[in-house]
Structure formats: C-alpha cells, structure tokens
Image (cartoon, rainbow, N blue to C red):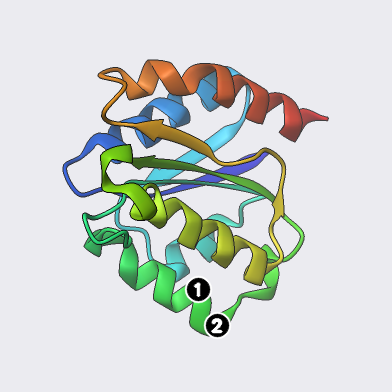
Amino acid sequence: MKVAIISGSVYGTAEEVARHAEGLLKAQGFEAWHAARATAQDLEGFAPAALLAVTSTTGMGELPDNLMPLYSSLRDTLPAALRGLPGAVIGLGDSSYGDTYCGGGEQLRELFAELGVREVLPMLTLDASETVTPEADAEPWLAQFAQALKA
C-alpha cells in the first residue's frame, strides 16, 4: 500500500518525525513516500492509498509556512483522488501555549474531513514541554496506524 506522508515543520522536529514514520512504515512493508515541500501535483503523482500528516504548530496556532502552499492547494481543489482514503495526523506543539496547542494538527484534521479522508486513528499529539524524543514517542501510535491500514 502506498502511504504519502506530508509534513510541516518550523524547526525541523516534525520533519524528523515524518522521516522516522517513513522508515517505520517501509519496514512494515508499505511503500511510504515523504517530501517536506510536496506540492499537490507531487502528491497526486504518487497516487497514495493512504495519507499521514505530521505537522508542528506556530506560536499563533497556525500551520508552518512550508506546509501552507500544499494545504491551500488541497483546500481549494479538494482532489477527488483523495476522497475515502484512510489517513491520520500527528500534531506537534507545546501545551504551554494553551488554546493554540497542536492547532496546526487540528487544521489538518479539518482539511482531511473536507477532503473525505477517513480518520483511522485519533490525532497523536506530541507535547514539546513533555518530550525530548518525539520520534520514539510516536512509535507505538505509528504501529497502530500501520495495523489500521492493514486491517
């Protein structure tokens, strides 16, 4: 199964988690693809059978700049090829920001709902104020994600 991983990162942590997810999914037998600055054309060209989004959140609760072009393009066009695909989101944030905690992840969940992507697992939230190893902390959830895709 082809799994596209999109990511948005401010300081690189979400990108590291996405790369780690790519490696773990490949080890599980998936054809995983990650591009940090993917365009809608890149995504459609890969023709995924599932989607995984990994994003951090800016201090204002928004998506990182490097993810905004893809986000806007998908929201504007709502490509039919993504409708009905299984997917999930990993949101990174800092709970000390209060109401905006993992706001970028929530924006991607909303986009996935608009696209008709089926959420196979609730969003994983990784709190920067509680972890220094987000890649390792994501591993159990990623194992569940892989199992959900195989089911």
Screen quadrant of the C terminus: top right
Say which residue appears at 64% left-offset and 71% top-offset. Answer: 114
What secondary structure is marked by label 2? Answer: helix
Q: Residue at x 46, y 36 (%)?
A: 125
**Amino acid type of the residue that numbered disc 2 sits on in the rendered structure:** Thr
Residue 36 is situated, as x and y percent measured from the top left of the image, at 31, 49
2 left or right of 45 in image: right
Q: Is residue 100 above or below residue 131?
A: below
The image quadrant where one finds the N terminus is: top right
Name the disc covering residue 77, or none. 2
| Residues tagged 2 and 1 counted as in contact (Cβ below 8 A) | yes
Q: Would residue 65 be seen by someone viewing this image from the given angle?
A: yes
- Residue 12 on image: x %, y %: 20, 39
Task: Give the residue at the far right of this rendering.
Answer: 151
Q: Against 26, is 114 above or below?
A: below
Q: Quick check: 131 above or below 37?
A: above
Query: Which residue is at the front of the view, 26 or 113?
Result: 113
Q: Is residue 94 visible?
A: no
Tell me what residue is drawn at x 25 percent, y 19 percent: 132
Q: Is residue 84 left or right of residue 8?
A: right
Q: Residues within 10 Å of mark 1 (few under 14, many from 20)?
A: many
Quarter of image, res 149: top right
Q: CA distance from mark 2 to mark 1?
A: 5 Å
Assign a secondary structure to mark 1: helix
- Which sits in the foreground, 14 or 4? 14
The disc placed on residue 28 is: none
Q: Where does the image place residue 129, in percent across and percent down from the top left?
A: 26, 28
The x, y position of residue 121, in whole percent, is 67, 38
The residue under label 1 is 74
User: In percent of the image, x 72 and y 41: which residue is there?
Assistant: 120
Residue 5 shown left or right of residue 3 in the figure = left
Residue type pointed to by label 1: Leu
